[in-house]
């Protein structure tokens, strides 16, 4: 069947998630394929934030820590994230950034395996993940070992304390077999940390069913929590009594408001809190999490696969194999919610597309990355994006001087 514009519109009319598009703020002249980097703004966010600022902060002032339950916001929002990642409510908490949370859970995991030093990851993992390991290695806490994704399960030996992997690869979208790798790590006596930054709210995750030990993830991609949204972390219940955070701040204290001189960790996952919760950021994140939970991850994942398959078919069906190489798994069940292509001038192509109103992104050195956030994307968006990509390539618009000036691309 030819997937033309009218076909795309027919798909949109039958789409059971179609009504959710109107619950996001989207510019009319833009096709937004970068929700895997920064999610779109839910319409409910501004009103919720205005209420917190104007009424709770403005009127009730410091009383809002108790009156409006600000003090338990990290636990409350964490409990709402938990079902999206296959966790129990008391195993997830919202705090800090992904990088800070990774430092906390990695140090804690190493503390649970004091007779081992190796942290096993893969080359090309998201840089901050590797940098956090390198920071702890520089402090004498561990050593980093890398193994290719295809063989990583076979490289987990008696020296490995922790396996650290990103569930969905940030460039290719390739998805690790979480259950298989976690089982292999446990069989070798190692623990596993999963980075869910490109997974949470986009693909089904079952941390509990897989027996995962720790996980971290961000709030500003598929959870639509806004730029720099607070991150979350997961600690399996079986580790909570013995795992120790290296950042022993007062919010992680067993009795923080008794203001004792000596630190005593709080019970459960709350010990991984550190400083004062960012209430405005938590408020915004909560709106996005509630909306994604309402739609349901299974429904989102089904539509994501349909959108990405249509896009790949349109792009590669146009005879682009000479110019573009699919850098993501061809099997839609083996990738997350974004699709990547290699192109010799990927940066310039990306900038030309942005100039034409199609916002994807570039990852060095040669990756064009297109995110499919199905809560607000439709099939007509996919068709228009593929059409503009063909135009940019056919007319060599990327070769214009204006698209060659390198800028920061987040």
Image (spheres, rainbow, N blue to C red):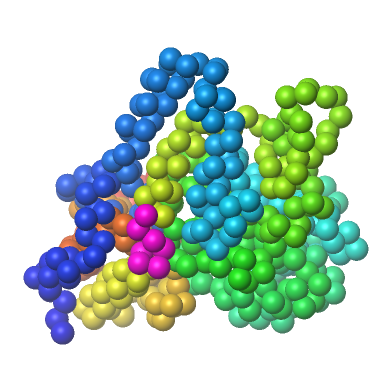
Task: Specify whether 154 is left or right of 307.
Answer: right
Instruction: Point out residue 204 in the picture as x, y percentages from the top left corner.
Output: 47, 67
Instruction: Point out residue 295 in the picture as x, y percentages from the top left corner.
Output: 35, 58
Instruction: Point out residue 229 in the picture as x, y percentages from the top left corner.
Output: 49, 41
The quadrant of the image that shows the N terminus is bottom left
Instruction: Give the vertical position of 37 relative to 188 (above or below).
Output: above
In the current view of this chain or complex, which residue is farthest to the right?
Answer: 115
- Span shown in magenta: 294-300
Task: Specify whether 194 is left or right of 364.
Answer: right
Q: Quadrant of residue 272?
A: top right
Instruction: Give the vertical position of 210 relative to 140 (above or below).
Output: below
In-front residue for pair 125/393: 125
Q: Residue at point 55% right, 63% down?
A: 86
In-front residue for pair 388/260: 260
In the current view of this chain or complex, which residue is farthest to the left?
Answer: 6
> What secondary structure characterizes most of the magenta part?
helix
In-front residue for pair 34/105: 105
Instruction: Give the vertical position of 152 relative to 70 (above or below).
Output: below
- Is there any visible trace of residue 377 in the rendered image? yes
- Is there any visible trace of residue 398 in the rendered image? no
Q: How many marks?
A: 0
Q: Is residue 236 magenta?
A: no
Q: Residue at point 71% right, 57% down?
A: 237
Instruction: Point out residue 387 in the picture as x, y percentages from the top left corner.
Output: 18, 66
Instruction: Give the vertical position of 75 relative to 371 (above or below).
Output: above
């Amino acid at each position: 069947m030819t997937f033309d514009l009218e076909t795309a519109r027919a798909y949109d009319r039958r789409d059971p998630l179609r009504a959710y598009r109107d619950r996001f703020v989207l510019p009319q002249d833009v096709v937004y394929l970068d929700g895997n980097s920064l999610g779109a703004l839910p319409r409910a966010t501004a009103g919720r934030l205005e209420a917190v600022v104007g009424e709770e902060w403005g009127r009730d002032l410091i009383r809002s820590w108790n009156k409006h339950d600000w003090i338990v916001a990290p636990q409350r929002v964490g409990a709402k994230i938990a079902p999206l990642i296959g966790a129990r409510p008391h195993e997830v908490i919202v705090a800090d950034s992904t990088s800070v949370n990774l430092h906390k859970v990695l140090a804690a995991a190493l503390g649970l395996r004091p007779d081992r030093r190796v942290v096993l990851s893969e080359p090309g993992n998201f840089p901050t993940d590797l940098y956090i390991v390198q920071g702890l290695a520089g402090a004498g806490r561990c050593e980093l070992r890398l193994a290719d994704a295809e063989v990583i399960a076979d490289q987990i030996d008696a020296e490995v304390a922790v396996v650290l992997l990103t569930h969905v690869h940030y460039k290719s979208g390739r998805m690790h077999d979480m259950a298989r790798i976690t089982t292999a790590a446990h069989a070798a006596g190692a623990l596993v940390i999963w980075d869910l930054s490109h997974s949470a709210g986009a693909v089904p995750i079952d941390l509990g069913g897989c027996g995962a030990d720790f996980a971290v993830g961000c709030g500003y991609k598929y959870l639509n929590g806004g730029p720099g949204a607070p991150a979350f972390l997961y600690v399996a219940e079986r580790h909570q009594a013995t795992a120790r955070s290296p950042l022993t701040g007062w919010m992680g204290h067993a009795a923080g408001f008794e203001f004792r001189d000596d630190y005593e960790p709080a019970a459960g996952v709350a010990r991984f809190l550190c400083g004062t919760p960012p209430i405005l950021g938590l408020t915004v994140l909560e709106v996005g999490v509630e909306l994604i939970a309402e739609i349901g991850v299974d429904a989102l994942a089904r539509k994501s696969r349909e959108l990405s398959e249509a896009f790949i078919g349109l792009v590669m069906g146009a005879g682009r194999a000479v110019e573009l190489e699919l850098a993501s798994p061809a099997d839609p069940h083996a990738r997350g919610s974004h699709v990547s292509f290699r192109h010799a001038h990927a940066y310039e192509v990306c900038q030309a597309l942005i100039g034409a109103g199609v916002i994807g992104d570039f990852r060095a050195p040669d990756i064009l990355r297109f995110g499919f956030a199905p809560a607000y994307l439709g099939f007509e968006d996919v068709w228009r994006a593929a059409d503009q990509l063909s135009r940019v390539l056919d007319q060599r618009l990327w070769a214009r001087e204006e698209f060659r000036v390198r800028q920061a691309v987040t």
